[in-house]
């Protein structure tokens, strides 16, 4: 008999409920995003909607980089103002 416990590897995939929990959002929000094709990439595995953990992490990083509050390069306040051309009557 073995008294040693073998560690289980971390799951590589999450179902919709677990993925929503992982992202800190409601399952309904994730379902709506999936329906609108707005959220993180998902796929069907045996009839169940699944998400790869690494893909969720990549999607979160991409969302962060696309937000001007997190990415200074996208912040419109960090650019020089554009001068308007003078109108002639």
Image: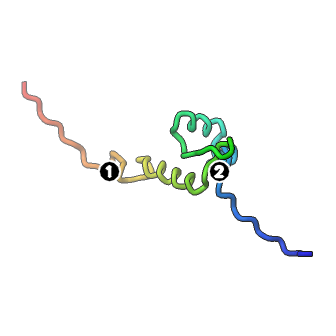
CA gap, disc 1 to disc 2?
A: 33 Å
Q: How many marks?
A: 2
Q: Which residue is mark 2?
A: 22
Q: Is residue 42 left or right of residue 17?
A: left
Query: Which residue is at the far left?
Result: 89
Q: Residues within 10 Å of mark 2 (few under 14, many from 20)?
A: some
Q: Nearer the viewer, residue 4 or 30?
A: 4
Q: Residue 17: where, in percent of width, then height?
A: 69, 44
Disc 1 element: helix
Q: Residue 71: where, in percent of width, then height?
A: 41, 52
Q: Quadrant of residue 44?
A: top right
Q: Is residue 61 left or right of residue 43?
A: left
Q: Nearer the viewer, residue 57 or 43?
A: 43
Kindly tell me whether residue 21 is visible in this rendering.
Answer: no
Quarter of the rendering occupied by the C terminus: top left
Which is nearer the N-term, disc 1 or disc 2? 2
The residue under the point 54% across, 45% down is 40
Q: Which residue is mark 1?
A: 78
The residue under the point 52% across, 54% down is 58
The residue under the point 76% across, 68% down is 7
Kindly tell me whether residue 52 is visible in this rendering.
Answer: yes
Q: Residues within 10 Å of mark 1 (few under 14, many from 20)?
A: few
Q: Are marks 1 and 2 in contact (CB under 8 Å)?
A: no
The residue under the point 28% across, 49% down is 79
Q: Residue 69: where, in percent of width, then height?
A: 43, 48
């Amino acid at each position: 008999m073995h008294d040693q416990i073998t560690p289980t590897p971390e799951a590589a995939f999450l179902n919709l409920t677990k993925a929503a929990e992982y992202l800190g959002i409601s399952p309904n929000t994730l379902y709506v995003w999936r329906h609108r094709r707005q959220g993180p990439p998902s796929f069907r595995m045996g009839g169940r909607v699944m998400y790869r953990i690494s893909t969720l992490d990549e999607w979160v990083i991409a969302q962060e980089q696309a937000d001007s509050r997190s990415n200074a390069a996208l912040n419109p306040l960090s650019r020089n103002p554009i001068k308007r051309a003078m109108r002639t009557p």
